[in-house]
Image (spheres, rainbow, N blue to C red):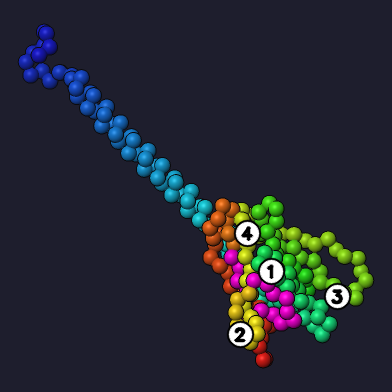
Amino acid sequence: MKPGGGEGSGEDGFTLLEILVVTVVFGLLSVALWQGVGVGTRGWSQAERRYGDEATFQGTEESLRRLIERAEPPDARGASVFSGDAERLGFVSWLPEQGGYRKQVQVAFGVDADKRLVLRWGRFRRADCALQPEIPHEETLAHNVGRVEFSYYGVVEGHYVWQKTWESRALPLLVRIRLERVGGGDLWPAILVRPLLAAPAGE
């Protein structure tokens, strides 16, 4: 009882122990709250990164698929040979233009020194064309690519097998593209594309 106060006046204050307990409780609640905010923020950032990765993958896959599907087999003079190894791929295809595919182009894919998967393309000119060569256009399809691996499914000595190189007058039945991130590990799932004009052996 305070000096000079009446008994049961209800004016007694909090003790030091009670104040300490309340302070500790508020501190623990604050820590829990900020941890929850941190987890939520990290989850949001991870979701944004996943969305960005998926959008980039879809764009890259669409570009590869659109051009490889419309690869041209060689003509009577062998002008449009589909040629590739494990790290590079080149062929003649068609670019979309005004709702269709009207521009025949020579395209090439590969990873450059800056670890980018790059598409280079220019207007297709036949060997007997005397016009000046054009500077090829370049488009970056993906960043932070440690390496790309192309492989080709077709006939070798009468057997259908996957090959590391392709240099033939026929188109491969399938092209598989694997992208590896810088530091190792698959960047995305493997992409499988079938050239539309490819024909099995004997057809």
Residue 55 visible to the viewer: no
Q: Amino acid at mark 1?
A: Asp
Q: Which residues are magenta?
A: 164-178
Comparing labels 2 and 1, the label whose residue is closer to the camera: 2
Q: Which residue is pictured at 57% across the width and 56% down the height?
A: 181
Residue hosting label 4: 147
Residue hosting label 1: 85
Residue 5: quadrant of the picture? top left
Residue 161 visible to the viewer: yes
Distance from disc 4 to disc 2, alpha carbons, whole Å, reads 29 Å
Q: Which residue is pictured at 66% across the width and 79% down the height?
A: 172
Of mark 1 and mark 4, the one earlier in the sequence is 1
Label 1 secondary element: loop
> Looking at the picture, how far across and down is residue 131, in whole percent?
92, 69
Comparing labels 4 and 3, the label whose residue is closer to the camera: 4
Of mark 4 and mark 3, the one earlier in the sequence is 3
Residue 166: quadrant of the picture? bottom right
Distance from disc 1 to disc 4, alpha carbons, whole Å, reads 13 Å
Label 2 secondary element: strand
Is residue 175 a member of the stretch shown in magenta?
A: yes
Distance from disc 4 to disc 3, alpha carbons, whole Å, reads 31 Å
